[in-house]
Amino acid sequence: MCAAESKKLSFKAKVAIALAVFVITILGITALNYYLKFFGPNVTDKEEYLYIRTGSSFSDVYNTIREQEIVKDTTTFLWSAQNMEYPGKVKPGRYRLKKGMSNRKLINMLKAGNQEAVKLAFQNVRLKQSLSGMVAQKLEADSVSLMKLLDSAAYVEKLGFDTNSVYAMFIPNSYEFYWNTSAEKFVDRMHDEYQKFWNDDRKTKAKSIGLSPVQVSILASIVDAEALHDKEMPEIAGLYMNRYNKGMRLEADPTVIYANNDFGIRRVLNKHLRKVSPYNTYLNKGLPPGPISMPSINAIDAVLNFKKHKYIYMCAKEDFSGYHAFASTMEEHLVNARKFQQALNEMNIKK
């Protein structure tokens, strides 16, 4: 082979090598770009959660991500979402975001609907309106929708309640829900929990004391309102069971406060006792039509296991300890009542 041909081959080899290097570089850049689009960190720490409402389109999701600056590069997110066929698979929910998440990881989470559950705990909630507001702060369901259900006679009748007694269905505890739970699904879950709570043992105890589960909850709400100390609950429950079984009016001050819709009352006066209401147990015999607050589990069990005694009167002790002085006769009760009234006067508590 002559020198000219050797140089020609050497030049071709160099061109080939250069071309190969160029192609490999381009492929490398393309691969790197592809990798960064899919696997590179893109999620910011601007928001802790991404909320996707029921019925949202991909456009809604994309606008939220862009407006809340959830990702650093919206273009690569959009490109990744389209390539991963996410636009047609949007699922509502509350999704936990972690700084540095890749587009691929974020989109896989959204496509799969892998949302983080919401913890919802409630107890000592006085009114169902208050509960509805609390639920609306934690879940997608709004308070208006929830109240419409609870105030619907036809709806709650299917669950075994009326609009007054339905509040007995809510057993105070800690629960987990998905954020996109609707008002109806929330109520359904609470009904399931209610049925679990009222097991055969509790139902048998309720029957043995002559009350239905709803009646137990109504009385428990009164006991709960009266008792500052849980250990006194069975004794208070026993007192009200004595009055109830004797056909006496319960004459429970908390029901008067509820009837007057004035929860700032510290001293029940004669004007409060005259309030005409089915909840005023000074005017009406028997139990009120519904709970006056959400009864605690301790109060419910205190009614089911009430302490048997002969007391039919009680009055708060004059030492403001939260305990009560119990009596089986009116004479004994009047002595206790005068002591407490004197203590109120000394503290200048007039209302």
Image (cartoon, helix red, strand yellow):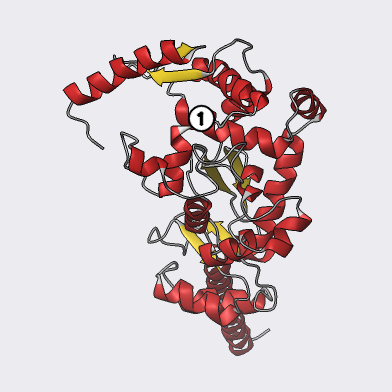
Up the image or down, 200 lies above or below 68; here it is above
Q: Quadrant of residue 173?
A: top right
Taking depth in this image into account, of 269 and 173 the one nearest to the observer is: 269
Q: Can you say which quadrant of the picture contains the N terminus?
A: bottom right
Q: Can you say which quadrant of the picture contains the C terminus?
A: top left
Q: Is residue 270 visible?
A: yes
In screen coordinates, is 256 left or right of 14? left
Figure disc tally: 1
Q: Residue at x 57, y 27 (%)?
A: 299
Which residue type carries mark 1? Asp
* Residue 244 image offset from top left, x and y in percent: 63, 27
Q: Secondary structure at mark 1?
A: helix
* Residue 91 image offset from top left, x and y in percent: 65, 68
Circle 1 sits on which residue? 224
Up the image or down, 201 lies above or below 324; here it is below
In screen coordinates, is 124 left or right of 193? left
Q: Residue at x 61, y 79 (%)?
A: 57
Up the image or down, 27 lies above or below 171; here it is below
